[in-house]
Amino acid sequence: MFASMLVMLAVDLSLPQARLEVAARVVGSSGLYCTSHFPDGTNRPCMPRFAVRPGNWVNAKQKAGTIEFTVGAINRLTDDEFALLVGHELAHWYLGHKASTSTIELAADRRGATLV
């Protein structure tokens, strides 16, 4: 139960403003535009959600439209390094990746690098 509480808390944490600005810059430079259609009839531009999860190591993951960064990724990377990480995870989202293989990771690296 404690582990599930940590996960719930991690999803509720938000990116610091400086990191959110880096992520927004990468998302905005993607040139990929789409519209999300919601059951209530509203439409909004596609944009992933960003969340923070515990961990002092540098890591991130994308799942179901949410990109989660570890605290270590936020605190230890430079703005340029963080932008590359955002681009890589954003590429997974745009490309619809649901698994991780060396081929999939390379595709995310290639597409992600063009976004920065």
Image (tube, helix red, strand yellow):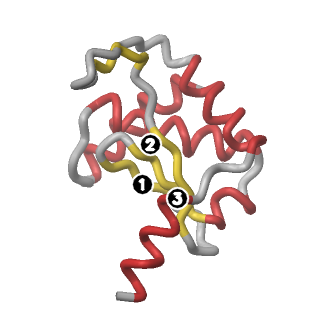
Looking at the rendered image, the disc whose residue lies closer to the viewer, 1 or 3, is 3
Q: Amino acid at mark 3?
A: Asp
Q: Residues within 10 Å of mark 2 (few under 14, many from 20)?
A: many
52 horizontally vs 33: left or right: right
The mark that comes first in sequence, 2 or 3, is 3
Q: Residues within 10 Å of mark 3 (few under 14, many from 20)?
A: few
- Which disc number belongs to residue 12? 3
The mark that comes first in sequence, 1 or 3, is 3
The mark that comes first in sequence, 1 or 2, is 1
Q: Secondary structure under badge 2?
A: helix
- Which disc number belongs to residue 37? none
Q: Amino acid at mark 2?
A: Glu
Q: Is residue 70 above or below residue 28?
A: below
Q: Is residue 33 above or below residue 105?
A: above
Q: Amino acid at mark 1?
A: Lys
The Cα atoms of the two marked residues, 1 and 2, are separated by 6 Å
Q: Nearer the viewer, residue 6 or 32?
A: 6
The residue labelled by disc 1 is 61
Q: Residue at x 61, y 52 (%)?
A: 14
Q: Are marks 1 and 2 in contact (CB under 8 Å)?
A: yes
Q: Residue furthest bottom?
A: 2
Q: Residue at x 59, y 72 (%)?
A: 57
The Cα atoms of the two marked residues, 1 and 3, are separated by 16 Å
Q: Quadrant of the N terminus?
A: bottom left
- Dividing the picture into quadrants, the one containing residue 28 is top right
- Dividing the picture into quadrants, the one containing residue 35 is top left
89 horizontally vs 12: left or right: left
Q: Is residue 57 above or below residue 50?
A: below
Looking at the rendered image, the disc whose residue lies closer to the viewer, 2 or 3, is 3
The residue labelled by disc 2 is 89
Residue 54, position as x, y percentages in the image: 56, 72
Q: Residue at x 62, y 35 (%)?
A: 23
